[in-house]
Amino acid sequence: MSWEIEHILTRSAARYLRITGWLLIPLYFLMVLALYGAFLYAPTEKVMGEVQRIFYFHVGAAWNAFLAFFGVFLGGLAYLITRKQWWDHLAAASAEIGVVFTTIVLTTGPIWAKPVWNTWWPWGDPRVMTTMVLWLIYIAYLILRSSLPEGEKKYRYCAVFGIIGFLDVPIVWFSIRWWRTIHPLVITGTGEQLEPEMIHALVVSVITFTVLYLSLLMLRMAMRLNSSVAEEVGQRLLEERVERV
Amino acid sequence: MNHITLIWIIAEKDLRIEYRSRQQAFLTTLFFALLILVIFIFAFDPGSRATRDASPGILWVALLFPGVIQLNRSFQTEIEEGTLCGMILSPVDRGVLFLGKLVANWIFLVIIDLLILLAFVIFFNFAFSSQLLWIVLLIVLASVGITGVGTIFAAMVSSIHTREVLLPILLFPILVPIILAALSGTQEILLREQMQSLNRSIQLLVGFDVIFLAAGFLLFEYVVGD
């Protein structure tokens, strides 16, 4: 890597940071709006009560997690085709964000499920199980990332795992759903109708979370670019000092 | 030479290496599986109804963990002896290479699994009836999917020093569909009189096998790309 390339990388990192800065402005207003929607605008659910309001954050976080895991898949696929490191940065940043938001989904879920379904963790529900497996797959992805030495091989391996992991998701969903049908049903249908106000609040919440994903993504991308440049520069300075000695 | 011959040459090489090393690793793996079964027997009362209901799960735990150990060895010797490079340099298609390693892994896995099944039937006091052949079929099918992803992941982790822990971490979440299908099929065979959804289990296993095999076949090229 020459100094010019590093210069370009640092410049693009600065650009991502600038984009993050710009995204924060709509994000701020959206978050206020989403909080207003979830806590004041949407009516209290008749049966479940106030605890139902966690739904707006739960669904938003789940949407984000799915978006992020699609980013891992897309980044991996594009990396294998183009061999540009940028795509690996995208996949890595997305995986980190995805794991965080899946954790939020898996924490807000039980808080709601305990009073409503009378169980923290309904193992028979395909959504719960698939989310759990998803969480495990992408934590495995991050562990794989951290165990491989930096380099082209790491990006390739992570891309392969990211692709297999994402393709696995619908299969997991399907197999758990099928597996459940021969088991006793723990949870019966929760398909109650949503009030229009609730739908409005949900839509705002999902949009807010999408913007949040984009800002976090830009932030992490900038960090990754900067840290790879810093590593390279450090290495170069070390070599120069060794040469001088 | 046609592809089938090439695949068999690679698989046969692995089998011969294992045979000439006096099957030491093979027997150790088998012993480990036996140990898992014994621990489960200590943990639960072997005669009780509850243990009988849980026995399909116990069987598949005892089949999966030794299987991962066996898969881990698949590329370990190649790395230690530096023979992977030679194989990559040989004028063989990467897909053929993958299938060769896969066939060897699959044969190992099925042999180990059948011996574990034998111990399981004896320990848990099941009858040696023709129904067991259905479990053999489930094992044979599940092993295809397990080695399909397992071979590619084993190649990926072979250069990492924490590979013994890493392989199950990567493999088990991905294999959830295969495990579920095999497990429910086994429950059906061992615990229920009429087997109405066994067909579904077998169909799903075949479907998952095809998906995992295709994914492994297409992506292996990127794992041994250098």
Image (cartoon, coloured by chain):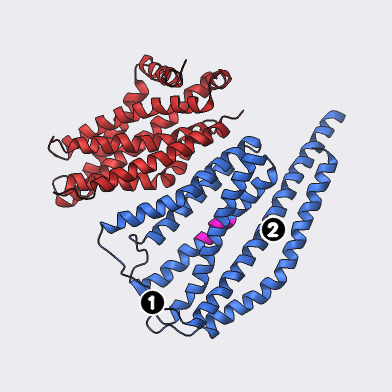
x%, y% of residue B68? 39, 35
Q: Residue furthest right?
A: A244
Q: Identify the chain of the residue marked 2, using the numbered disc in the image.
A: A
Nearest the viewer among B141 and B56 is B141
Q: Main secondary structure of the magenta part?
A: helix
Q: Quadrant of the C terminus of chain A?
A: top right
Q: How many marks?
A: 2
Nearest the viewer among B47 and A39 is A39
Q: Are marks 2 and 1 on the same chain?
A: yes
Q: Which residues are magenta?
A: A97-102
Which residue bears the numbered disc 1? Answer: A192
Q: Nearer the viewer, mark 2 or mark 1?
A: 1
Nearest the viewer among B99 and A220 is B99
x%, y% of residue A62? 51, 63
Q: Specify the amino acid type for callout 2.
A: Met
Whether residue B44 is visible here, answered yes or no, is no
Please say if the residues under marks 2 and 1 sit with CB atoms less than 8 Å apart: no
In the figure, the blue chain has which letter?
Answer: A
Q: Specify the amino acid type for callout 1.
A: Glu
Q: Identify the chain of the residue marked 1, using the numbered disc in the image.
A: A
x%, y% of residue A208? 61, 70
Is A205 situated left or right of B32 in this image? Answer: right
